[in-house]
Amino acid sequence: MTALQTTPLDRFQETIGKHQLTIIHEEGLHRHLRCARPQSSDRYFNITTWPGFLCISGDMGCYVFQRVEDMFEFFRDESIRINPGYWAEKLQAGPYVAPDEITREWVPSKFRLEIKEWFEDATVEWDDADKQEAWEEVESEVLSEADNEHTAITAALEFRFNDKELFQDFWEVDCKQWKGHYLWCCYAIVWAIQQYDATKQEAP
């Protein structure tokens, strides 16, 4: 596997190799764990739990989840499998911030690819001259707005060529991806619980 093909899990494992777990506090479901490289704050993180909640904070961001009384039970996994979509539903975001804004990001290249595919499907029976003219207008009026989610979607929905709507249902298309820091933190939670469990098993 080349560097260009590395997965979020690969990137997480590359950065976590020298991290060590320190149990700073533990009293029932009230826990404070710190994971870091010795004498380094690079990608350090804390796991803090209290009944019904788990917070991961540190160098890679801060996320607070709420689901069950003991959140270690919710995230515990023998391998390092994550469920970013389901877990995002358990995020305790601010009252005016949707979890999707915290965990996912707009991808202009994905938008451009989707527009191209929609255009090809919509114009499959057009003659070459009309198709070429329409595509030039798409590039000018729609793809030029690709860097901003709101203006890009609006441009697609409002686009007309000879009174024909080519992207009238484009608002349904997902042009986002999970943010790298969010995925890293999801893996970090599972990894930290694994280290915690291993410590408990080794204790006399």
Image (cartoon, helix red, strand yellow):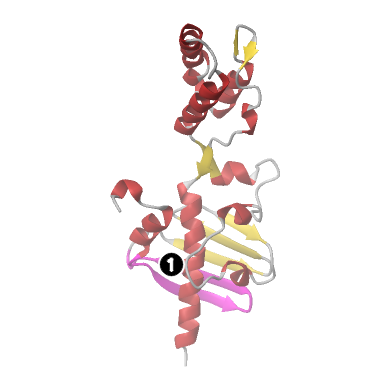
- Asked where in the image residue 52 lies, by quadrant, the reply is bottom right
Whether residue 150 is visible:
yes
59 left or right of 100? Answer: left
Identify the residue at image location x=64%, y=33%.
Answer: 172
Number of numbered tags placed on the structure image: 1
Residue under label 1: 35
Name the residue nearer the viewer: 119 or 51: 119
170 left or right of 199? Answer: right
Name the residue nearer the viewer: 127 or 108: 127
Q: Main secondary structure of the magenta part?
A: strand
Pinpoint residue 186: horizontal percent, then vertical percent: 51, 58
Pinpoint residue 174: horizontal percent, then vertical percent: 58, 37
Identify the residue at image location x=50%, y=78%.
Answer: 197
Residue at the farthest left position? 2
Name the residue nearer the viewer: 94 or 121: 121
Identify the residue at image location x=49%, y=12%.
Answer: 131
Pinpoint residue 78: horizontal percent, then vertical percent: 50, 73
Q: Secondary structure at mark 1?
A: strand
Image position of 181 with respect to 20: above or below: above
Image position of 77 with respect to 131: above or below: below
Q: Pointer 1: residues within 10 angstroms few (<14), some, or many (20+)?
A: many
Pinpoint residue 97: horizontal percent, then vertical percent: 65, 42
Residue at the farthest bottom position? 204
Whether residue 23 is visible:
no
Q: Is residue 30 magenta?
A: yes
Q: Amino acid at mark 1?
A: Cys
Identify the residue at image location x=53%, y=70%.
Answer: 77
Q: Is residue 167 magenta?
A: no
Q: Give the residues drawn in magenta, as a range.
A: 17-39
